[in-house]
Amino acid sequence: MNQNNYQKVSKQLLKLIKQYDKIVVFRHAIPDFDALGSQMGLVSWLKDNFKAKEIHFVGDNHVTFTGRLYPKMEELKDSWFEQNTFLAIVIDVGSLERVSDPRFTKADKIVKIDHHPHEPGFGDLDLVDTSFAAAAEFVVTLLANMGRKYQFSKAAASYFYSALVGDTGGFRFSSTTKRTFEVAALLLSSNINISEIYQLMFEKELKDLAVQKFILDSYQLTKHGVAYYILKEDDLTRIGITSELGKVYVNMFSNIKEIEVWCSITEDKKDNCYRVSIRSKRYPISEVAKKFKGGGHKQASGATLLSLEELNSFLKALDDEIIKNSNL
């Protein structure tokens, strides 16, 4: 999508925003920085620039981010969705089933803004561009193309910046481009406090040291450089964390010379499976993730194992990906 196309779709998005007095912003379930930061950044931008409109945000809370870095999600009753005509804007979601709150389907119109590989489309305005490093980068680009009349407040810019940092690995992933830094510069012009943002994003507590110790004592490394740790239900209880927090520690291995790919594998008793977060320095991992009921980006993806019986196949697939690409 070139600059002219961004201006075109920005006008389409702005027309829909102006058309509706009530707007609800949605994003994917089990949210990360990009999902929450993009959602709350857009919510703040809408409230700042369209003060007469009724703006809402819904979805599941994150166990640590919400209430600290982002506000807790609203709890809108079903009756609100039944009784109101509204526009739904769904951010950072590739497929219908990943939207955190299914009530977006009750909207009069649906806008989707996403940067994941294109799944079967949905929405009346289906905006997908995989060249963006983060959903926030795409959203900010669209908003910036609406003209100088519409401003980014410090709050909106702070939320978007946290999303940008989160999905680029602190601007270290290969998906980071010149445009990524241009968007970051635009957000910085709103006088955001990046020191405070980083502190809120990555702040740890003493109990985190015990979790890290457990992981360092139990992690495994394959022959070709795939590091992984497994957190079973009993482990989670012993070290005092929830299954949602299992993946938080995955980047402990990001700067180890001998490690090429690293994974967290966390038991989810509620859904009777193991949730996997996968990260990579340079090798593509998204195709492996797709083979194991997941997907994502070249260097950051998620997958699901129905049981640990699938573990060896999963690790072999990652090893094979390293072997295949190491000679390129």
Image (tube, grey):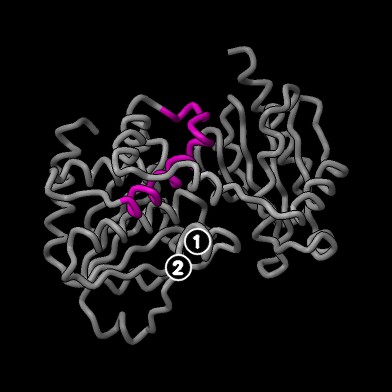
Circle number at residue 209: none
Q: In terms of depth relative to the viewer, which is nearer, 179 or 208?
A: 208
Q: In terms of depth relative to the viewer, which is nearer, 121 or 128?
A: 128
Q: State whether residue 322 is above or below residue 54.
A: above
Kindly identify the residue that appears in the image at 19 percent across and 70 percent down: 53
Q: State whether residue 234 is above or below residue 92.
A: below
* Residue 201 appears in the rendering: yes
Q: Position of residue 234 (x, y in %)?
A: 84, 63
Q: State whether residue 327 is above or below residue 83.
A: above
Outermost right residue: 217
In the image: residue 7, left or right of residue 267: left
Q: Main secondary structure of the magenta part?
A: helix
Q: Which quadrant of the figure has residue 142? A: top left
Please state the extent of the stretch shown in magenta in the rendering: 154-176
Is residue 161 highlighted in magenta? yes
Mark 1 highlights which residue?
29
Kind of residue sitting beneath label 1 = Ala
Q: Position of residue 152 (x, y in %)?
A: 26, 49
Kindly identify the residue that appears in the image at 66 percent across and 67 percent down: 271
* Residue 309 appears in the rendering: no
The answer to whether the residues at label 1 and label 2 have Cβ atoms under 8 Å apart is yes
Q: Position of residue 256 (x, y in %)?
A: 73, 27
- Mark 2 packing: few (<14 Cα in 10 Å), some, or many (20+)? many
Circle number at residue 59: 2
Q: Secondary structure at mark 2?
A: loop
